[in-house]
Image: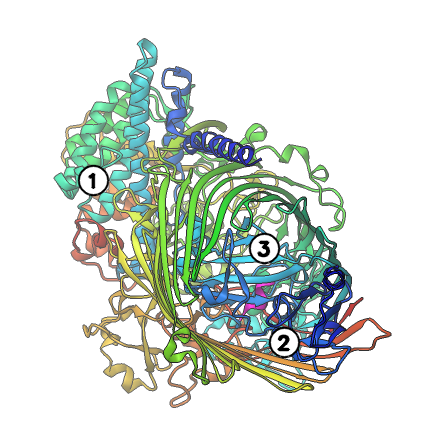
Amino acid sequence: MKTHLLALLFLFTGFTLFAQEKTVTGTVTSADDGMPLPGANVSVQGSTTGTTTDFDGIYEIVLEEGDVLTFSYIGFVTQEVSVDGQEIIDVSLKPDLESLSEVVVVGYGEQKREDLTGSIATIDSEEIQKTPNSNVMQSVQGKVPGVQIVSAGSPGASPTVRIRGLGSFNSGSSSVLYVVDGAFYNNIDFLDSKDIKSINVLKDASSAAIYGVRAANGVVIIETKKGTRNKKPVIEYDTYTGIQVAQNVLKMANAEQFATMAYESGSEADAQFILNAMQRYGRSELNPNVPDVNTDWYNEILREGIITSHGISVTGGGENSTYSVGANYFDQEGILDMKNEYERLNLRSKLDINVTDRIKVGSSFIFSNATQYSPEGSAWFKAYHAVPIMPVIDPQNTDAFPTRYSNAQLLGYRGTQNPFPDMRYNKNQLKVRKILANTYLETEIIEDKLTFRTSYSHDYSTIEGHYVNLPYTLGNNVEGFSSIRREQNNYSNQYWDNTLTYEDSYGKHNLTLMAGHSYRDEAANTFSATGRDIRGIRLETSQFLNFADPSSFSGNVNENGARIYGLSFFGRAAYNFDSKYLLYGTLRYDGSSKFTQDPWGLFPSVGTGWVLSKEDFLKDSSALNFLKLRASWGQLGNDNVGASSGSNTINNVYGIFGGQPYTGYTSSSVFTDNEWELVEEFNFGLDAETLNNRLSLSADYFIRDTENAILPITIPVINQVLNQNAGTIRNQGIELSATWSDNINEDFSYSVGGNFTSIKNEVTAIQNEQGYINSGSAEFRQRTVVGEPLQSFYGLEVVGVFQNETQVSNSPFLGNNPEAQLQPGDLIFRDQNGDGVINDEDRVFLGNFLPTYTYGGNISLNYKNWDFSLSVYGQGGNKILNRKRGEIIYTNDTNMDADLAINRWHGEGTSNSYPSSAGLRKSWNQQLSDFWIEDGDFFRIQNLQVGYTIRNEKLPEIRLNFTAERPLTFFKYNGFTPEITDGVDRQTYPIPAVYTVGLNVKI
Amino acid sequence: MKNIYKVLLVFGLSASIFSCSDEFDTRTGQLNTGDLDYTDPSEMSGALVGAYNAFSTRGWEEALLLAVRGDDVNAGGLGDQQPFADTDNFIYNNGYWMYNSLWNLHYSDIIDLNTAIVQLERYREFMEGEDDLRAQQYIAEVRVLRAWLHLNVARTWEDVFIYRTNNPFEEIEANGVSSKEEVMQFIIDEMDEAIPNLPNVRPNERTDFPGGVTAYTAYALKAMANLELENYQGVADAAGEIINSGRFSLYPDFYQLFKIPGELSNESLLEMQFDELGSDVGGTFYHNFAPFGPQGWTPARENASSGWGFFEPSMKYIKFMLDRNETVRLETSVLFTDRGINELNEDGYTDLPAFVSNTTPSGDVINDYERAYFASGKHYLPSDQLPEEQNSYGSAKNFIVTRYAEVLLMYAEAVTRGATPTAGSAAEAVNQVRNRAGLADLPSVTSEDVMDEKFAELAMEWGIRYYDMIRLNNYSELSYDGRSFSESSEYLPYPQEQVDALPLTN
């Protein structure tokens, strides 16, 4: 249109110009995928002449020979072309990879990356989609410094996410806040990674402070995909399918090793049990002292699991609206050989409409329908302990019904051991349905300056649980009663946000002000009922309460609910002078009905930045393209703690008198009246780009204190544990990341990146009488004290193993610890206080479960139509309590892993770190010591992907890929996986390797 | 247009502020003491039921730890809970969780009982006449239960705290620990105050709360406290009140006394009561008796679970009983295994009576298990007495705390130690107990005879034997089966976690 006007203008004025006018046409495309770019700006340098490309990326412009054309498009590098005789100028714009000008979502608004003063990391959709997993956050592992992801192996389970260490005692209180298109979540298991446009991790307090009382553990802002204006519909189909294979399966002692250990234990009973097994199952032909059974229980309970995903989406936009709709299907089988599966269907739509130039409305909608069959965690535990001299099925066990599973009690063992009854007779079905609906209205009250936005979100979730136990017998009077537990959890959370944003520039002064208000109402309700004695014994059908004996319901019916209200006012000011001097500040005033003492709290933050590279003395530096120093400070609240009761509560109880039940109550004598946990953080950072923008570096140092930390304080005298604001927890560390990327030529480009994080977790204050807080069980003690990390393992230190009688008799412990009845093969502990006796006073801190450092790296190569990427991840400094081993303290007749069996002390000089078989059964050696605590260091090939893209004009764009997710992990820990959320490995679900092939088609 | 937005915005903001600020005071899903109606006399008993609930919900380890040091019982539990076995051998570890748990559970229940008293006092403010008397009775009942908990902690640790309030920080600050004597005197004083408000009936005669505390329960506790003080006249006087009431008698069948038929018998003075909660309420209210049970058995009733094997009658006790030609009391008190019987044979007890067998009178067969040779019979419920569909060991069995036989024997002991008889001779009291056990009368009894009778009659019950022996400084009896007992071993050290938090020193 503009060109026609110009032409008319020329016609009417009739000037004759010296220069020669001509019309140039062409197409602007994206160098990335060759797709046309509609709406790209095409302008003549030094004039007001300009146009934009149409739907097909085509433009037409009238200019003069010798002019310079500028092509620009958001997110792409601006390109200039001199007109020198060409009539057709096609350009292909390169995406702006460094994207300093990229816009970052900061919570109730956006900011340019170069203007940020805090620490915000962004992961884009491409990276997210490389990881075949049901949970989006798994893809973040190893990619963002300062963010620790502890993988979850079970299908549908969410990984643990820790941003900058652990600031709360209870892991339940340390969950990250997810903001999905404006709605708040503690869990985003309902999102499909294909629907994500970007993930922004707000790491420092200053960035997160705008979320006030919810933000203490860091904030992850997730935006789902939306359409682009003036773009033809793009239909995208994406699928992958593959298998999951258990990795690093722990080697258990086999029948021969187990029998040897049993004979060496000196326990008559244990030897007798071996004999019993030989009588029952016969003697091995190879070794007549070993029963003719050799069951590898892990092998028996494991399987390969299929993983499949399909997604289809359509995105696009017209002149006044954009849209994005899609459907995703995800299915994952667990590697535990039982009904262990996760299946999810997601429907999604997002619509944005410009009603007028200044009024915009939109809505988004996600419906997620998932069915999850949870594993029986006990199977992992039982498989570890089950003796190898027993088969899975024992035809002689005629008392076992319906399947003749073996029962170790029939050989004399204390437990039944066989994991199969748990796996076969139980079903844990969860139907998880979640709806997220959001609608907003945005209007420019003053054009380009003052914007008002109101947004309402409702997140409604239901979890329908069916827990079915079928009746069975296992011989030796072991009977499992049938029961059905129905659980219904409903969550209804509403959020209403209103913001007013003012943006203006005065010369080089740029200012953005935002003021807002937020209201939230979060209600939860749980109903559960248990019935026994079910009729019908098929797991598939007998899952409803009506199949149970009606008289068994009463008393097994529970309902509970809670509702929390919150009201907040907040504001933000972001100012910069010429994008050189940056100032940033937020303030949030939060009220929450959880706190009875004072529901209101004020959370401020400030940030400042200095872009040195824009100063005169660096402006022309060719080596340094960009350099920014940042500093920020902020306070955050954590209301993700139990609500205060505010007064004495009563609890309904029963008493029996003469065989009749009487109802009554007990009332508490103490109650909670807490405040939120308060996080205060300083962050200092640096961002730099050098060597022609090819190398970008980023570094951060932070000190993050959680004050008023809620700790489980044992109230002396009353002897009740009460969660109280009673401590300070400090996390401090550094985060480094570097990326090198380069385009060698049109056919070949590559990038290499790495990141490193070091975090020190330390408790700096505890206010209670004892001066410490015990956790874990008495046998596996964890203790929190000032100067040590949270919940450190607390036990004795092993210095060696008694090798001979002389050594024993020379030891002071022989006489001073008479109960130990020391023998060669027993552990020697360090007598920390030198009093000649080993007791509780000799316990020391043996480390905790938080890694002190993590690192990640990635390489990606693009050659013609091929692409390749590899990422790695590692961590160290964390300790794992190998509790499955340690539980020998409760039953000492069970199996153990091969490492214990092979490395045991069995004569002078055979080992100076492992006790003898007899020693393993003695309480002296069973005391918690660093023998049971192992290093959790590991290094892993996180993800490997090879892709091939078919680009042919006649065909839609097709990309094929092969992905190996977590194919190799290297570690020393004696377990399936070193990724143990809270460091206590009892029955952790192993993390499988996943191999998939995928296909992506775009039309 | 602009104005409309502003109006909308202001309206929206104010609406949400008003709608929410009110909500800050609501606590959805929480019941507070403010929800109770203290003017309603019919609600008053709720606090009393809560007190009995607190008294009856005992951790499995409590009764074990209270009793294990006696020469009547051993720890069992080989290969598990070693410090428990060490405790049985008088090697104490004050970091051991059981010590702390016994302390914690007892004191937190004392606080709960004190809170129940506070609640009852609040009702009392609004009660008149009969209801006021009832409130006073309830308070007296709670005070008796509280006294029993204080008795246990003082017997275990000697000098301990007395808590009269439910927020006793000030009491601790003011008084510190009280000596064992002071605690016993506290119990005596408390009982003297409680008795006038309590009904003069047998617990099983009560119609409002069958099995609840009566004046005689208080007398029994008073006798026990006096016994600890070696104030034998006080013992004879308090026990004499019970005997002279004529309301109590020994349950004829000693074996069934500890089973379902013997629940709330005329012998019972204090009993923790357990049962299914019935179809109206649903669920169960049980004590976990499994630690007392044998670890392996073939039950008469299919699929009944066995126990944990943590409580083993001592060889010394069994030989003592065999030497006395005891029958029903030995048969009732001990569950035998073949392994245990072999052990007896090897020690020369070859000519054993027929009831010494691994089959109980109820037809349950006790199999050999590694942990122990014997299991406790007094904590055993025959599998055929288990409620339907309940497999847990000892389900629905009551736990007798104090019975008339103990009162008779306390009386007899007091008289033999010089107290003026108030309720007949010592021999009369002892012979009642002997007759029920199928033994002949003794013409007269010495203190020695009474102590032997107590050993035979009350073994495995709440550590009565152990506390008798340390009261009498009879360390030689406790130095049995390779153990050696000295005065320093009488009391457990305070749990480390309590030492760290409270003004206590070991």
**Circle 1 chain:** B
Q: Which residues, given as a range, are shown in magenta?
A: A135-141
Name the residue nearer the viewer: A309 or B136: A309
2 or 1: mark nearer the eye: 2
Instruction: Report the amino acid beneath label 1.
Output: Phe
- The colour scheme applied to this rendered structure is rainbow
Q: Which residue is mark 2?
A: A79
**Circle 2 chain:** A
Q: Is residue A140 magenta?
A: yes
Name the residue nearer the viewer: A705 or A528: A705
Q: Which label is found at residue B169?
A: 1
Q: Are marks 3 and 2 on the same chain?
A: yes
Instruction: Report the amino acid beneath label 3.
Output: Ile
Q: Are marks 3 and 1 on the same chain?
A: no
Q: Which residue is mark 3?
A: A188
Report the label total: 3
Q: Residue B347: x and y, percent?
A: 38, 63
Q: Residue A112: x and y, percent?
A: 50, 63
Instruction: Report the amino acid beneath label 2.
Output: Gln
Quarter that holds the N terminus of chain A: bottom right
Quarter that holds the C terminus of chain A: bottom right
Q: Residue A935: x and y, percent?
A: 43, 76
Name the residue nearer the viewer: A868 or A573: A573
Regarding residue A377, the answer to whether it shows in the image is: yes
Element under disc 3 = loop
Relative side of A604 to A27, left or right = left
Q: Residue A32: x and y, percent?
A: 69, 75
Relative side of A851 to B302, left or right = left
